[in-house]
Image (cartoon, rainbow, N blue to C red):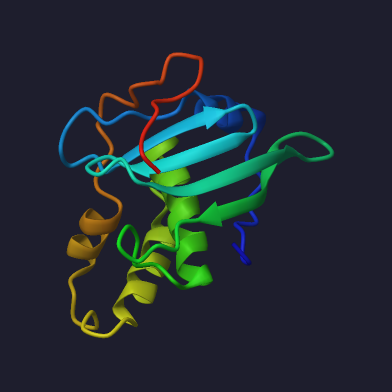
């Protein structure tokens, strides 16, 4: 990805991100797991891997995304916009894995989605549910150490 999130993730955030997120119900749309420094984000219904983000330590503490790749096979993922991909990657980590409200990221994702042909009038709630899904109020089902699930990517 040419554009990466600029956020510095705290050491506590990084620990939670490493634990991952497994969906418990149909409306949870993401599986997130870490393999060492790489965090993989897969769609829960298809198992398709859409993002792989490499985290690196930052002087003074915390981590940042130092590099990321995104699926570009249009049969698996229709995204072709780096700004959109950057926001979606950060939003899944913030809202789904960490459980943050992330209103600014949500608004930006809705705005970028509405710019696409045929999406100008789409309701924000529909856009967010379709792309992001929900986070189970009970919290994430961690991947319990070790590598994440082996899915077709």
Q: In this view, does 71 lie above or below 93?
A: below
* Residue closest to the eye, 68 or 28: 68
* Residue closest to the eye, 6 or 69: 69
Q: Is residue 147 left or right of 1 when viewed as pictured? A: left
The residue located at (51%, 16%) in the rendering is 146
Task: Indicate the position of residue 133 as horizontal and vertical percent values.
Answer: 25, 48
The residue located at (41%, 20%) in the rendering is 143
Which quadrant of the view contains residue 140? top left
Which quadrant of the view contains residue 144? top left
Count of labels shown?
Answer: 0
What residue occupies the far right of the structure in this picture? 59
Task: Indicate the position of residue 54 as horizontal and vertical percent values.
Answer: 64, 42
Task: Indicate the position of residue 81 as horizontal and vertical percent values.
Answer: 47, 73
* Residue closest to the eye, 127 or 147: 147
Q: In this view, does 8 lie above or below 107?
A: above
Q: Is residue 27 above or below residue 111?
A: above
On the rendered image, what quadrant is the C terminus found in?
top left
The residue located at (43%, 57%) in the rendering is 88
Task: Indicate the position of residue 14 as horizontal and vertical percent values.
Answer: 60, 31
């Amino acid at each position: 990805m040419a554009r990466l999130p600029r956020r510095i993730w705290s050491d506590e955030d990084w620990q939670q991100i490493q634990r991952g997120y497994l969906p418990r119900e149909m409306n949870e749309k993401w599986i997130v797991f870490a393999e060492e420094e790489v965090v993989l984000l897969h769609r829960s219904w298809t198992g398709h891997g859409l993002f792989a983000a490499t985290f690196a330590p930052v002087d003074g503490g915390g981590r940042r995304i130092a590099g990321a790749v995104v699926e570009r096979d249009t049969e698996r993922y229709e995204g072709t916009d780096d700004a959109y991909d950057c926001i979606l990657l950060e939003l899944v980590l913030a809202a789904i894995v960490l459980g943050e409200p992330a209103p600014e990221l949500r608004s930006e994702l809705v705005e970028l989605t509405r710019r696409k042909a045929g999406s100008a009038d789409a309701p924000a709630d529909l856009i967010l549910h379709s792309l992001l899904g929900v986070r189970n109020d009970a919290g994430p089902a961690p991947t319990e150490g070790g590598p994440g699930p082996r899915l077709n990517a």
